[in-house]
Image (cartoon, coloured by chain):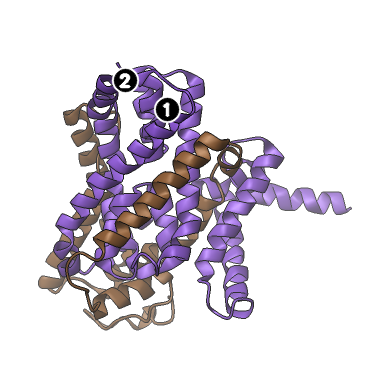
């Protein structure tokens, strides 16, 4: 009897995947807001808890299924893949632009460009130095790992363009994913320290951190009003990285290591 | 009408992503260059244009702001489908590269946000925050729409 009920529920969840995702995520946020209010006395933002819970569940789901898409690999929760996928994520990010104060955004425009340049070069340098320290000597592998430190999309795009082998590609992607996860969790912790509390600094932050998923999660967990400003610069970051990674950056590394 | 707001948002997104793809092809990059950013700029321009002509109705605004309010839930769903297992099992090279670039970039944010004067922050920014947080009170613009009251 229990078995039939369980199967019935699972069937509904599989069939109504997106609707089920709305319900599950809503419940997760409800629990997180309750925890934020009563367990942390409002010191931690409810969305920060929800995002960390989401990551923990993604870990559990990943261990359980052995897949790459966290909870979304569980058939009954596949709708989370659609709800949190690139299509709806970008749609919602664009919608937040409706709340942008144009004066503020324009004032920080140049700062955003500077941040984008730094946000591409700094992680690349760290990534390449780490690769060299761990014994990689060929320009292709060094560049691919360095590009992974920019974002997890720039890494494989660059690696594919310059012909990196698959283990280096995997390392590069893992670096980018780890960075994205760390940005989501770390941002609310350091926000006050780095002055992330106004549209100007949010635009600098978006350009520097780059990774759209990291920035989207990090700002949501810190202060929702900063989301559109950070997203505005962050969305240019991956494209710029894919542009300079296999070209200028690769040529620079090759000139240095021969 | 609400659907017009949603359609406006969809139109801006599609055009922006298309232009981003086009820019990628022109630059010879296998990626979309700033498509979402272009879409955001289009939506900001559309909002200014509509409100100047007095055509930014409550319905249109609600159609867009609903999706802005869905932003955080969507981000939570995004977090729940990250490949955290891969991130946790990457080994020292992955951890060092990721942590190093993160610390350096946080430092650069601190530096850049100190350049220029401090912004006092505007009411528009604060209101935007409450919309994205998903619990904004509707503001009175355009025609009053009694049917919408309480639906947020």
**SS class of the residue under badge 2?**
helix
Q: Is residue B3 visible?
A: no
Residue plotted at (20% across, 61% down): B44
Q: Is residue A20 left or right of residue A120?
A: right
- Which residue: 31% across, 72% down? B128
Residue at 50% across, 28% down: A170
Which residue does the numbered mark 1 point to in the structure image? A132
Q: Quadrant of the C terminus of chain A?
A: top left
In depth, the one of B95 and A231 nearer the eye is B95
Query: Judging from the image, what is the letter of the chain drawn in brown?
Result: B
Say which of B15 and B2 sits in front: B15
**Picture coordinates of residue B92, whole percent (x, y):** 55, 37
Label 1: few (<14), some (14–19) or many (≥20) C-alpha neighbours in 10 Å = some
Find the residue positioned furthest to the left. Answer: B53
The front one of A3 and A118 is A118
Tell me, by letter, which chain the rendering colours purple.
A
State which quadrant residue A251 falls in.
Answer: top left
Left or right: B104 in relation to A51? left
A50 up-or-down from A73: above or below: below
Circle 2 is placed at which residue position? Answer: A257
- Tell me which label, 2 or 1, sits earlier in the chain: 1
Check contact, mark 2 vs mark 1: CB within 8 A.
yes
């Amino acid at each position: 009897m229990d078995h039939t009920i369980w199967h019935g529920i699972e069937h509904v969840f599989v069939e109504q995947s997106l609707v089920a995702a709305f319900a599950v995520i809503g419940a997760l946020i409800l629990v997180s807001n309750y925890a934020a209010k009563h367990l942390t006395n409002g010191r931690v933002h409810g969305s920060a808890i929800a995002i960390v819970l989401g990551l923990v569940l993604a870990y559990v789901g990943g261990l359980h299924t052995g897949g790459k898409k966290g909870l979304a690999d569980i058939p009954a929760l596949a709708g989370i893949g659609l709800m949190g996928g690139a299509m709806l994520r970008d749609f919602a990010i664009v919608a937040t632009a409706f709340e942008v104060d144009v004066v503020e955004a324009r004032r920080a425009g140049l700062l955003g460009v500077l941040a984008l340049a730094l946000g591409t070069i700094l992680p690349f340098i760290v990534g390449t130095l780490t690769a060299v320290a761990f014994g990689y000597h060929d320009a292709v592998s060094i560049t691919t790992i360095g590009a992974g430190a920019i974002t997890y999309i720039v890494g494989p795009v660059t690696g594919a363009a310059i012909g990196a082998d698959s283990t280096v590609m995997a390392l590069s992607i893992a670096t980018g994913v780890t960075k994205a996860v760390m940005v989501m969790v770390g941002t609310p912790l350091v926000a006050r320290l780095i002055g992330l509390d106004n549209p100007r600094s949010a635009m600098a932050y978006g350009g520097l951190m780059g990774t759209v998923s990291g920035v989207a999660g990090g700002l949501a967990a810190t202060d929702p009003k900063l989301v559109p400003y950070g997203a505005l610069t962050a969305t240019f970051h991956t494209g710029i990285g894919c542009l300079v990674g296999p070209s200028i950056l690769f040529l620079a590394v090759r000139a240095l290591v021969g | 009408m609400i659907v017009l707001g949603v359609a406006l948002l969809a139109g801006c997104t599609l055009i922006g992503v298309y232009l981003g793809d086009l820019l990628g092809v022109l630059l010879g990059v296998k990626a979309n260059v700033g498509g979402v950013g272009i879409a955001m700029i289009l939506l900001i321009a559309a909002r200014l244009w509509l409100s100047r002509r007095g055509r930014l109705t409550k319905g249109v605004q609600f159609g867009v702001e609903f999706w802005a309010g869905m932003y955080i839930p969507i981000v939570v769903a995004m977090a729940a489908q990250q490949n955290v297992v891969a991130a946790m099992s990457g080994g020292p090279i992955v951890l060092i590269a990721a942590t190093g670039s993160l610390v350096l970039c946080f430092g650069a944010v601190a530096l850049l946000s100190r350049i220029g004067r401090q912004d006092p922050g505007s009411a528009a920014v604060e209101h935007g925050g409450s919309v994205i947080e998903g619990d904004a009170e509707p503001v009175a613009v355009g025609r009053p729409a009694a049917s919408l009251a309480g639906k947020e």
